[in-house]
Every structure is written in C-alpha cells, then in structure tokens.
Image (cartoon, rainbow, N blue to C red):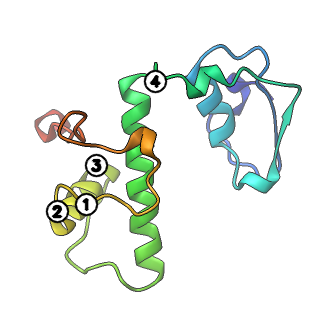
Amino acid sequence: MTDFASQGKTRVNNVVHLNDTASQQGYYTALSCSAMANGTLILQGFNPSIISDKKCSGALHQESRDLELLDDITRLHFKGKLHAAVVGETRRTLIHSFRQHKSESYMPQHMHSAIRWSKKLPYIEPDFADLD
C-alpha cells in the first residue's frame, strides 16, 4: 500500500512499500495506519536516512512528542493512575492539561533522545488563540 492509499485507515495487518517514498511524511503516513508493529510488513528495503537524519521537520518532530505524551496519558488512564484534573476534549487541550498537572518539564520515561525537549529545544505549546 502506498502512503497516499493508506491515509485515514487503521489496519491490523499493514503491508507497506517504502522504497519509493522520499519523505518523512510519507513514511509516517504509511506506517501510522498500522494497529501494531508485529502486523506491519515492509516490502523491499527503504532508505533509513529519511527517518534517521536530524533533518526532521518541526511539525513531525512535535507530532512525535505529542504522540509520546498521549501514549503516557493513555497508559496512566488504563492503570487508573491518571489524575482527575487531567481533562480535555481535544488532543491539544488534553496534552496542555496533562503538562499543567505534571509540570512543564515532565517527560515520559521512555521518550527517545531524538525527540526529548530541553531549554535549547523546547516543547512547543499550541497557540490556543488560534482555536477560535
């Protein structure tokens, strides 16, 4: 399945062809419809430098950070350890509420070093004025 054909679909078994995909967005789109890693089959090879080089777009970098925070929120919720003050009707408001409760410097335990934030590379809070 190409990255274009995979948009908006979640699959238990996801067969992807990344060999002709030339961007991080293409890789993300094709792989993000996989329900789980063990159901994903990558045909042929792929160019690892597309996803491993430090040329990741700011939006994709932030998306990876947000997904890690949402994963942490989900894990805590299912363990019954998510504080009742953490609420939100959208991912933006939920992440904002979570970071306000935990602290601005809180980072999920298993956050990959490539997407960790710091004073030099801060987490970017969305502009809530743009939501109107």
Q: Residue at x 70, y 17 (%)?
A: 21
Question: Residue 56 bears which disc, if any?
Answer: 4
CA neighbours of label 2 inside 10 A, class few (<14), some (14 to 19), many (20+): few
Give how far apart the Cα atoms at labels 1 and 3 are.
16 Å
* Mark before the other along the chain sequence, 4 or 1: 4
* Mark before the other along the chain sequence, 1 or 3: 3
Give how far apart the Cα atoms at labels 4 and 1 are.
23 Å
Residue furthest to the left: 129
Q: Check disc 3 and report the residue beneath it.
A: 92
Residue 6, quarter of picture:
top right
Q: Amino acid at mark 1?
A: Tyr
> Is 62 situated left or right of 56 in this image?
left
CA neighbours of label 1 inside 10 A, class few (<14), some (14 to 19), many (20+): few
**Could you say whether the residue bearing mark 3 is in a helix, strand or loop?**
helix
Q: Amino acid at mark 2?
A: Ser
* Mark before the other along the chain sequence, 4 or 2: 4
Q: Amino acid at mark 4?
A: Cys
Q: Comparing marks 2 and 3, which lies closer to the viewer?
A: 2
* Mark before the other along the chain sequence, 3 or 4: 4
Q: Residue at x 36, y 83 (%)?
A: 81
Give how far apart the Cα atoms at labels 2 and 3 are.
16 Å
Q: Check disc 1 and report the residue beneath it.
A: 106
* Mark before the other along the chain sequence, 2 or 3: 3
Give how far apart the Cα atoms at labels 4 and 2 are.
26 Å
